[in-house]
Image: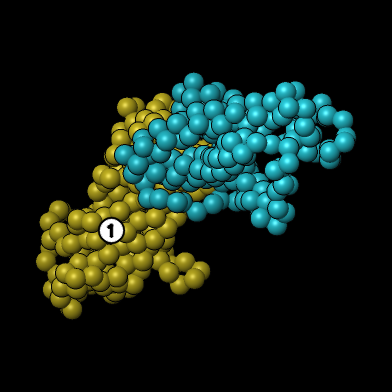
Amino acid sequence: MTNYFAPLTAVAVLLASACSAAEPPAPKPAAAQKPAPTPTTPPTTAPTGAPATAPAARPAGAAHYRQAGGASLAFSFMQAGAENHGSFRQFTTGLTWDEKNPAAGSLDVTVQTASLETQDKDRNDTLAGADLFDVKKFPTAHYTANSFAKRADGGLEAVGKLTLRGVTKNLRVPLTIRTSGSGLELSGEVTIKRLDFGVGQGDWNSTEWVGDDVKLAYKVPMTRAD
Amino acid sequence: MLLIINQWVIAERADSLPLGLAKLKALAWHKSFGLTILALAIIRLVWRWANPVPDLSTETRTWERRLANLSHVLLYALIFALPLTGWMMSSAKNFPVSWFNLFQVPDLVAPNETLFQRMRHLHHLLFGGLVAVAVLHVAGALKHHFIDHNDVLKRMLPFGGPGDGPRAKPHD
C-alpha cells in the first residue's frame, strides 16, 4: 500500500519559485538593477516579455537569492498503512526571482541524500542503503528549473528536472513565494513517485508495504545574494 | 490467548530479522494484532462490568479467592499494558501504527529514543509477567478441576455452565 522508505525523493524537490512574491529591496525601476555578478546577457528591460525558456538571461529586475537558516525539506510516505515522516537536513537552494516577471524565475536545489533523518537509525540506514537512496553512489539529488509557470489554480510552479539516484525526470514543483523579513520564503508541496527514480530495488520495488508516492514539503527562507 | 501466543511468535521472528521488508511486515502484523487485543480487552472489561462474576464462596477458600482476584487484576492490567507499551514503542521510534493497513491510529508520544528503550524493556518485562500470571491462572483452574473437583473450570469454558462436561477446546 504505500511506500516505505521512499523518502528519498524528497530530496529533490526543492522548489523554487515564486509565486507571487516579492522582492523587497529591489529598486523599482527595472533598469536600475545592478549588473548580475556573473556574466550573462545584458539585462533587458522588457517587463513581462522574457520568454520562460531562455534560462541563461538574467532579466532586468531579477534578483538572486540564497538559502537562509531554518529551511526544511520534509518527506512522508505510507508504510504498512501508516504515514512515515522524515526530512533532509542538508540542502542548498538558489533562486532567481523577479516578481514582475515570474516566468523568468529559476531555481536550483541540491540535496545531500546522506542527510536524511527519520529519527530511527535502522530506518535511516536502510534508506541510505544501496536498494533505496544509495547515498554512497548518489550522494546528491538535484533539482533545476529555468522557468516558472502559472498553475491552473493561479499559483506558481517551477518547470524543471529532478535528478535522483541517477535518474532525471521532468518535474513541476509548486511554489509559493512571499516576502518575509528581509528576503523571501519559498514553500510548497509536491508528490513524486519513488519508483520513477529507482528508489526501491529488490524487495523495496514492491509498493504493497511501502507506497510509491512520496510527498515532499518544503519551506525555505531565502536572502538576497547580490 | 491464541492471539497472545501468536504475538509472541511474530515478535520473536521480527526480532531476528534485519530491518527489511520481512521485518516491516512482521511488525505490522504484530502491531495490528496488538491493537486487536487491546480492543478485545476493552470489550472484556465492559462485559465484566456489566456481568458480575459468579459467587464462588461456597466452593473455594478465602486464600484461593484472594489469589484468584489478584491474578485476575494482574491479567487485566497486563493485557492493557502490553499493547499500550508496544504502541508507545512505535510512537517513540517515529513509526506510526495502523490496524491491518486499514486505518492509522494516533501517536501516543513524540519520537524519543530514550523513551523507546524504556518502553521496549517494559514491554518485554510485562510479557514475562503475563506468562507468569497466565501459568498461575491455568494452574488454579486445573487445581479446581482435578484436585478440588468443583465446577470452576467448567464455568470458565465457553457454553459450559456447571453440570456440562469439560470441553476440550481452550477458551479464547
Residue located 82% across and 26% down the image: B168
Q: Is residue A151 left or right of residue A180?
A: right
* Colour chain A is painted in: yellow
* Colour chain B is painted in: cyan
Evaluate whether residue A13 shows in this view: no
Would you call the spot at circle 1 few (<14 residues within 10 Å), some (14-19), or many (20 or more)? many
- Quarter of the figure with residue A156: bottom left
The C terminus of chain A - image quarter: bottom left
Evaluate whether residue B65 shows in this view: yes
Q: Is residue A169 left or right of residue B98?
A: left
The residue to which callout 1 is attached is: A220
In the orientation shown, which residue stands out farthest toward the right? B164
Towards the viewer: A180 or B133: B133
Towards the viewer: A203 or A64: A203
Question: Residue A32's x, y, as percent?
Answer: 13, 73
Residue located 69% across and 25% down the image: B143
Residue located 62% across and 35% down the image: B64
Specify the subunit that label 1 lies on.
Answer: A
Q: Is residue B156 left or right of residue B68?
A: right
